[in-house]
Image (cartoon, helix red, strand yellow):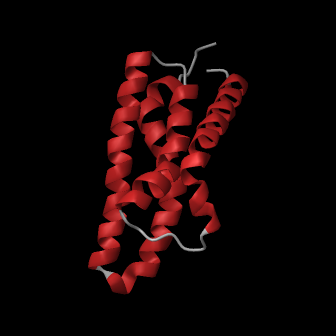
Amino acid sequence: MDIIVFLKKFILYLTVLYILWIPIAGKYFSYSVVAVDATNFFLFYLPLTMIPFVALVLATPIEKSRMIKFIFFGLVLTIGFNLSIVILQILFSTFQTDLLYLYAIGRIAFPFLLWVAFTHETIFVFRDE
């Protein structure tokens, strides 16, 4: 996999996806605190994790059927990750601040780790030269 081509595609897909998302999430950027309810979860918090993952998968040179499958399962796992943090914050309110830090780190790391887990056969190709 040519890293420069991949990075160019990734940045392009990431930019386009975020530009498409701005009309939906634009109102949230003006608030200092966004409450966690179902609407805000699916329109604001979930896309913050899902958009980088989708851009990584779209930039990876894989077959379209695998790409669609990876995006679908990534969406399911991302929803599970985000919901688990919200549920843990409700159940263990004394650790709410610590769980918020975990969520903040996970929101950055989770898309990348999912992408590596799904596409490791494609991205880690070692060639004998």
**Is residue 97 positioned above or below 17 on the image?**
below
- Point out residue 88 in the picture as x, y percentages from the top left corner: 31, 71
Tally the marks: 0
Q: Residue furthest top?
A: 129
**Is residue 53 positioned above or below 123 on the image?**
below
Q: Residue furthest bottom?
A: 94
Using the rendered image of the protein, determine whether residue 124 is visible from the camera's viewpoint.
no
> Quadrant location of residue 69?
top left
- Point out residue 125 in the picture as x, y percentages from the top left corner: 53, 22
**Is residue 108 positioned above or below 19 on the image?**
below
- Point out residue 103 in the picture as x, y percentages from the top left corner: 46, 65
> Quadrant location of residue 72?
top left
In this image, 81 relative to 109: left or right?
left
Using the rendered image of the protein, determine whether residue 9 is visible from the camera's viewpoint.
yes
User: Where is the N terminus found, in terms of image quarters?
Assistant: top right
x 62%, y 62%: residue: 29
Depth order, front residue of 120/35: 35
In this image, 38 relative to 104: left or right?
left
- Point out residue 12 in the picture as x, y percentages from the top left corner: 68, 31
Q: Residue furthest left?
A: 91
> Quadrant location of residue 5?
top right
x 64%, y 41%: residue: 19
In this image, 29 relative to 85: left or right?
right
x 64%, y 34%: residue: 16
User: Where is the C terminus found, in terms of image quarters?
Assistant: top right
In this image, 19 relative to 90: left or right?
right
**Is residue 41 positioned above or below 24 on the image?**
below
